[in-house]
Amino acid sequence: MRKYRLAAVLLVPLLALVFVWTRSGAQETPKNTHSDYYEHYEGTKTCLKCHEKDAENFFHSQHYQWRGETPKLVNANGRKLGKINTFNDFCTSPTGNWIGFVKNSRGEVISRGCSTCHAGNGLKPSETMSREQLENIDCLICHASGYRRDLYQNEKGDLLWKPILWKNQEGLDSVSKRISKPTRVMCLRCHSASGGGPNFKRGDIEYKLADPDRSYDVHMASEGKNMQCVACHAGENHRVLGRGADLAGSDTIGKDLTCESTACHSAPHKNPVLNRHSASLNCTVCHIPRFARTDATDMVRDWSKPSYNAEADKYSATITLQKDVTPVYAWFNGFTKAQLLGEPANFLPDGSVGIMIPQGSRDDPKAKIYAFKLHKARLPLLADKNWLIPITVEHFFSSGQIDPAVQMAAKEMYDLSTIKYTWVETTRYMGIFHGVQPKEQALKCMDCHGPKGVMDWKALGYKGNPMSLKPPPRKN
């Protein structure tokens, strides 16, 4: 694996809009479906004239709130959680990093904050609905083909996200009337660029999915089914189905998204041997044998070692990117244990802190083996309480000074001053669900059961290769 620097990657989410649009080409050319409904687009209030109920529904969704109900977190204790009030091992937390112009020594803007990928116009989401909050919803980011926005400062000094055509009323009116259900390109605007670069975070959500061939993804290939993201993920009332293994909240309570839960794959195989396997294996294990096949993904992010990129004049953590990665495999019953803010660190047997750990084992009849991206990081740990500390990365990007960024985050998050901390390795399991390959490219028997098979059988609770050492049957 080679080490790269975050700063070397200039495709931040804002620029990603152009990149994805160019690569997807003819995929989406929606007509001006709203041309008869209004003459001029004047911001979200134009949408609210007809869609206020939709806006209210969206206001309560995770896409807007960045938090939600947590029935799948074993240690949430009923709290509403999400990226707005937890932390992660990428850019760590929106607290202190929400919105702003971060400039390098040349005066160039190198970051605009986490709100870059929030479906709002700049205000932090409030749990109390108001007219201000409803008008903060950016409907076009998910529904307008070719829409782009940037960060601007108004006459009061407030920072707001606005369409780049805000001074060109004719152009803005044209874009705002190209309304459709969300397409892959619209979803990829944020979900491919999260984590600071193309495919850095998820590993299986690459820009290639804007217009893949069938060998890359059988569902989304334009010469195949040409399925959009909403074909699987659309719930009701602007809620989204699916949470994987490492999201805190669930947007659709009681409605899990799996291959079998849809009408598509209730009887996946004609071969009874394969169907017996599907009782213990999630479909992703065989059908996504590799991920990050086009864009390398972030596998290790070490915040204790600042890295400088002279071309971008920007600092970052030291990041290890890897391409064409074989997943790791673990049991998962749908529940996760999360490391939460202000709680003692959950140390794993290897000495790392478990940020998001899937629950389940071979003895759990509700668990299956899933494919995961295993992400490692180094984060600060508060010396006297063993609490993980986020980092105010927006200040770090320009200065490269990590200690002030940690001290500032401790003050913002815990109201603590002049703290002492150490550095600790962290572990996060991230489910791999996209980039489903044709059955001809799926794993074969010996890919798992051969002498160089991909499975760590002992880690999965077996005494050895179950093809050679037949284990006792699993519990029903």
Image (spheres, helix red, strand yellow):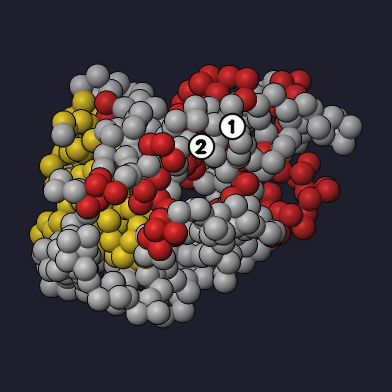
Mark 2: few, some, or many residues within 10 Å (few <14, many ≥20)? many
**Which residue is labeled 2 in the image?**
218
**Which residue is labeled 1 in the image?**
224
Residue 382 in view here: no
- Relative to 33, residue 52 above or below: below
- Relative to 69, residue 450 above or below: above
Amino acid type at circle 1 is Gly
Asked if marks 2 and 1 touch (Cβ < 8 Å), the reply is yes
Q: Give the structural element (helix, strand or loop) at label 2.
A: loop
Residue 57 on image: x %, y %: 69, 60
Q: Which one is earlier in the sequence, the residue at label 2 or at label 1?
A: 2
In this picture, residue 472 sits left or right of residue 383: right
Residue 474 on image: x %, y %: 32, 75
Q: Residue drawn 68% across and 49% down?
A: 135
Q: Residue drawn 32% across and 52% down?
A: 372
In this picture, residue 249 sits left or right of residue 445: right
Residue closer to the observer: 325 or 115: 325
Mark-to-mark CA distance, 2 and 1:
7 Å
Q: In the picture, residue 194 is in which quadrant?
A: top left
Q: Give the structural element (helix, strand or loop) at label 1.
A: loop
